Amino acid sequence: MEEKQSFLKQKIDLESPNRNIVPITTSIGGDGKLSVGGCSIEELVKKYDSPLYILDEFTLRKSCKAYKRALEKYYPGESLPIYASKANSSLFMSNLVSSEGFGLDAVSEGELLTALKGGVPNEKIVFHGNNKSDKEIEFAVRNNIKVIVDNDYDLERLEELSNSLNRDLEIMIRFTPGIECHTHEYIKTGSFDSKFGFGIEKLNILFANIRDTKHLKLTGIHAHIGSQIFELDPHNDLGEIMVNVILSAKEFGHNIDEINIGGGLGIKYTEIDDPPSIDEWVKTISNSVVKSCEKNNLDFPKLMCEPGRSIVSTAGITIYKIGAFKEIPGLRTYLSVDGGMSDNPRPITYQSNYSACLVSNPLNNNSNKKYTIAGKHCESGDVLFKEIDLAECKTGELICVFGTGAYNNSMSSNYNRIPRPAALLVCDGEAEIIQKRESPSDLLKYDVLPDRFIRQN
């Protein structure tokens, strides 16, 4: 029966956490129950309630160090890994990645403010987004944060702002490189269908327009080719494309000395997933850039990359408490938990798959049951797992879902007026709150009843 949950028995990859299903510090105690970061999950729930997000600090830091080490190993020029904060944005995450020498990518004033308050140096922050507001652009510029220009509208407003301030602004541009992952389709003559970035076929016009501005200085280019990527070949080709764009920009008088190749390295959510290691991914892109630069007698530009999911996802788990059961004879057994689509919208949104186990019986001993794990929200599609193998379980027991560090907390909502969970950091047997649990009364904080309704009552 143990094969059904064999991911808990697999050897842990200490050097590339994205290739593990579970956090590195996951263990099963002498009582047969699950722990992480040296902390008993049952004891954590007794103290902090459920649902509960938990992040393992050791796994987070190992992921960061893997990127830093690989860049230093394979890229002879200057490099900077930049955390894609959309994966999990918080004061804590900003502070942790900064302490590991990372920069940070933000796409809103809220993410920018979180990064600055979390201690990320402004010169290591880049500002993305396909529809930045005037207020957000001005906030970035006044805080000396580099803006990545996504479209003509960005460019127009940055030119106006730089002129009004009478100040030079260094910018990067984002373009679509004509590489689409997953299907491994390459579009050599134009840009694929994306809301982000300039089409590669429009770059020469863009280079001419930027050259004619008074204060805008084009110093970098950015391209991103996908998410949850398992292929290496597209990234091998991306380096050559980036270098060719540098050469084209040179013809218009632009000296590009920074390239940002995005992120997107996949992680292992389930046993069938087989992502490349962080080392392999960095080696592929670094070698591609180096080879193309040497071929064209070009100085090595500063190499940036933007990992998000592969930094934080495997470090995170979510704990739920089992409530109601509903057995439909000959069809399925529903098991309901105290969370769902408000704390993890990815299954209903993307049909995403995860791995899970009982906290009290993680190896699934004596299992002969399949359960469909349903959330508590008023949506038929609020289902976290369909037909998952678990040991026979009962109301009140705990379920641990792995790989939830990315895009769970950051995409969470208050649907059905359900408060967001607390989040904990665990390390060496200690647990600390990094996000307080919301209460129902917190959800009324910004509600306003119009005066005339008050008067009528």
Image (spheres, rainbow, N blue to C red):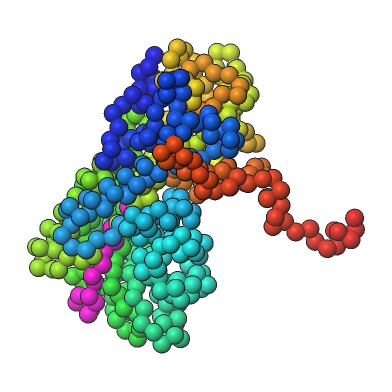
Can the viewer see residue 138?
yes
Task: Look at the image and say whether residue 444 sits in the magenta stretch.
Answer: no
Q: 263 or 328, which lies in front?
A: 263
The prevailing secondary structure element of the residues shown in magenta is loop
Q: Where is residue 30 shown, x and y percent of the image?
A: 42, 20
Q: Where is residue 271 shown, x and y percent of the image?
A: 34, 29
Q: Where is residue 259 shown, x and y percent of the image?
A: 26, 64
The quarter of the rendered structure image containing the N terminus is: top left
Position of 365 with respect to 260 (left or right) is right
Q: Where is residue 212 shown, x and y percent of the image?
A: 32, 84
Q: Quadrant of residue 29?
A: top left
The residue at 44%/52% (across/down) is 93
Can the viewer see residue 82?
no
Position of 434 with respect to 305 (left or right) is right
Task: Look at the image and say whether residue 251 sits in the magenta stretch.
Answer: yes
Position of 415 with respect to 241 (left or right) is right
Q: Please provide the residue range marked out in magenta.
A: 250-263
- Compared with 190, 219 (above or below) is below
- Compared with 34, 233 (above or below) is below
- Compared with 172, 260 (above or below) is above
Total number of numbered discs in the rendering: 0
Farthest residue in the right direction? Answer: 456
The residue at 45%/27% (across/down) is 34
The quarter of the rendered structure image containing the C terminus is: bottom right
Q: 365 or 456, which lies in front?
A: 365
